[in-house]
């Protein structure tokens, strides 16, 4: 059959709020034109993030009932540990309440002021946790990652030449190197097994450990199976195992490929690293056999991690992203290509050539999406990444003006995506009227969450 169907049917429904255009105009105005300040109850299709927003399966919901809430040594912990070990092979596994808690423990115990951590692309919480302890987070994306339109298959790869140079220059000042699979900030682009192996070979020469930011490890495994020679006949579990076997540890947000609404873990092989992790975990998250999670969460994650590795699920998930991507390409709506694993990124600068970076075209597109169809997306452009100019004046714009449409897992059906395409089609036809915005109020850090905007025109 040509149609790749959702490999599930629906047993429980959640009503979607449907609003009128005039209601949305009033709602957006009262949210100071910032969709982060809207109530979710006023959003019809919420594509703000794929994190913690997925639907759990019947198997996960029933696993919740098996949760053992014992403080120490619970049955649910044993199951969690066994599952994570089955997938990753790591010796020491610590549950955390989400990904950034794992990052915080890793950074606080292994980094010192002035250390350098290379990554193909730090996610913002990873960067913030590294910088919080005074270390330097360095992004080394491959050159093709910067070419938005290039159709290269593994645009999440790390630049090996730059890594070698950095290792040469910084040597013993690099306590670990990270690889983010898939590279979220780089457009959800995958990292090839060959790249992971080459990174590991380079690091081995100087004894630098490799830590995988594994949030979307199963989506990355699917890309490897589809796109990399020699993997077509391997299961996603085998591919994931091979990737983790090249690493010394991992941080994980189970809110993505754990198919859960909360949770994460930190893992490693080194006994003395594990001692440090354990001590800080007890101080800030909880006893090592629950680490900030309820026993029932550990159960749901144990099921979810394996469901994320099911071939039919990943095939449907990637088909959904591809379906929307090809509809946008055929309507001449510029997107980062090829489409990523968990999201589509619209190139708002190319979409709105009449706007300058200082007009915040990403905000114009995000707000047009909401006004047109109650769709919520997020700007990744000069509001999020712009920097104040030294000495005042116009701020330094971000390298790209992107809008991310992140796809929650197993939540929306094809007709929801047809609706999304219709909304984008309507905006595409009126693209010349997408408006410029100005910031009227902003916080000193992470201003995109709370900024107030007004139309500049
Ligand atoms: N690493 C990556 C690559 C991520 O995408 C995220 C979260 C984290 C770490 C942190 O995990 O949220 O569980 O603490 N990304 C979400 C997003 C928030 O919308 O992309 P967390």
Image (cartoon, helix red, strand yellow):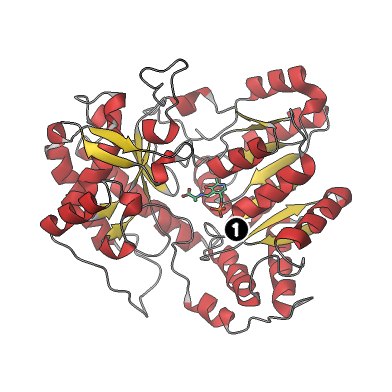
Residue 45 falls in image quadrant: bottom left
Left or right for 438, reference 425: right
Q: Secondary structure at mark 1?
A: loop
Q: Residue at x 47, y 57 (%)?
A: 314
- Furthest toward the top, the residue is 391
Residue 257 falls in image quadrant: bottom right
Q: Position of residue 163 (x, y in %)?
A: 67, 24
Q: Residue at x 79, y 76 (%)?
A: 73
Asked if residue 196 shows in the view, the reply is no
Q: Is residue 17 above or below residue 402?
A: below
Q: Position of residue 309 (x, y in %)?
A: 56, 60
Q: Quadrant of the C terminus?
A: top left
Q: Position of residue 356 (x, y in %)?
A: 26, 23
Left or right for 397, reference 297: left
Number of disc labels:
1
Left or right for 399, reference 208: left
Specify few, some or many for label 1: CA neighbours under 10 Å numbering under 14, 14-19, or 20 or more: many
- Furthest toward the right, the residue is 272
The residue to which callout 1 is attached is: 98
Asked if residue 26 shows in the view, the reply is yes
Q: Position of residue 281 (x, y in %)?
A: 75, 59
Q: Residue at x 42, y 36 (%)?
A: 384
Q: Quadrant of the N terminus?
A: bottom left
**Is label 1 within 8 A of ligand 1 (CB to nearest ligand atom)?**
yes
Q: Is residue 154 above or below residue 419?
A: above
Q: Is residue 182 above or below residue 30?
A: above
Residue 295 falls in image quadrant: bottom right
């Amino acid at each position: 059959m040509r149609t790749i169907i959702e490999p599930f049917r629906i047993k429980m429904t959640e009503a979607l709020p449907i609003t009128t255009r005039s209601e949305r105009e009033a709602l957006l105005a009262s949210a100071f034109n910032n969709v982060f300040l809207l109530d979710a109850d006023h959003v019809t299709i919420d594509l703000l993030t794929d994190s913690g927003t997925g639907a759990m399966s019947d198997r996960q919901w029933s696993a919740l009932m098996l949760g053992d809430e014992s403080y120490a040594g619970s049955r649910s912990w044993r199951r969690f540990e066994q599952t994570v070990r089955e997938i990753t092979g790591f010796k020491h596994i610590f549950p955390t309440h989400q990904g950034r808690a794992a990052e915080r423990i890793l950074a606080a115990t292994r980094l010192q002021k002035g250390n350098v951590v290379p990554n193909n692309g730090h996610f913002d919480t990873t960067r913030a946790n590294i910088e919080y302890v005074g270390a330097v987070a360095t992004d080394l994306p491959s050159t093709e990652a910067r070419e938005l339109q290039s159709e290269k298959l593994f645009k999440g790869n790390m630049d090996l030449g730059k890594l070698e140079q950095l290792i040469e220059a910084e040597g013993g000042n690099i306590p670990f190197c990270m690889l983010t699979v898939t590279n979220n900030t780089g457009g959800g682009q995958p990292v090839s097994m060959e790249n992971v192996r080459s990174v590991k070979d380079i690091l081995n020469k100087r004894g630098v450990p490799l830590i995988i930011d594994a949030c979307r490890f199963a989506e990355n495994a699917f890309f490897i199976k589809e796109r990399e020679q020699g993997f077509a006949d391997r299961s996603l579990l085998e591919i994931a195992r091979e990737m983790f076997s090249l690493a010394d540890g991992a941080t994980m947000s189970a809110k993505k490929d754990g198919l859960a609404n909360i949770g994460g873990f930190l893992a490693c092989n080194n006994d003395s690293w594990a001692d440090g992790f354990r001590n800080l975990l007890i101080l800030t998250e909880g006893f090592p056999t629950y680490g900030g999670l309820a026993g029932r969460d550990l159960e749901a994650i144990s099921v979810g991690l394996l469901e994320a590795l099911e071939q039919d699920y990943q095939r449907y998930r990637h088909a959904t992203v591809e379906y929307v991507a090809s509809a946008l390409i055929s309507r001449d709506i510029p997107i980062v290509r090829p489409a990523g694993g968990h999201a589509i990124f619209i190139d708002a600068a190319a979409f709105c050539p009449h706007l300058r970076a200082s007009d915040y075209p990403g905000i114009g597109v995000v707000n047009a999406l909401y006004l047109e169809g109650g769709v919520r997306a997020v700007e990744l452009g000069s509001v999020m990444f712009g920097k104040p100019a030294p000495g005042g004046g116009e701020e330094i714009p971000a390298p790209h003006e992107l809008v991310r449409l992140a796809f929650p897992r197993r939540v929306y059906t094809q007709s929801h995506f047809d609706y999304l395409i219709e909304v984008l089609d309507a905006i595409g036809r009126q693209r010349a009227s997408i408006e410029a915005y100005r910031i009227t109020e902003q916080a000193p850090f992470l201003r995109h969450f709370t900024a107030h905007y007004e139309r500049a025109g």
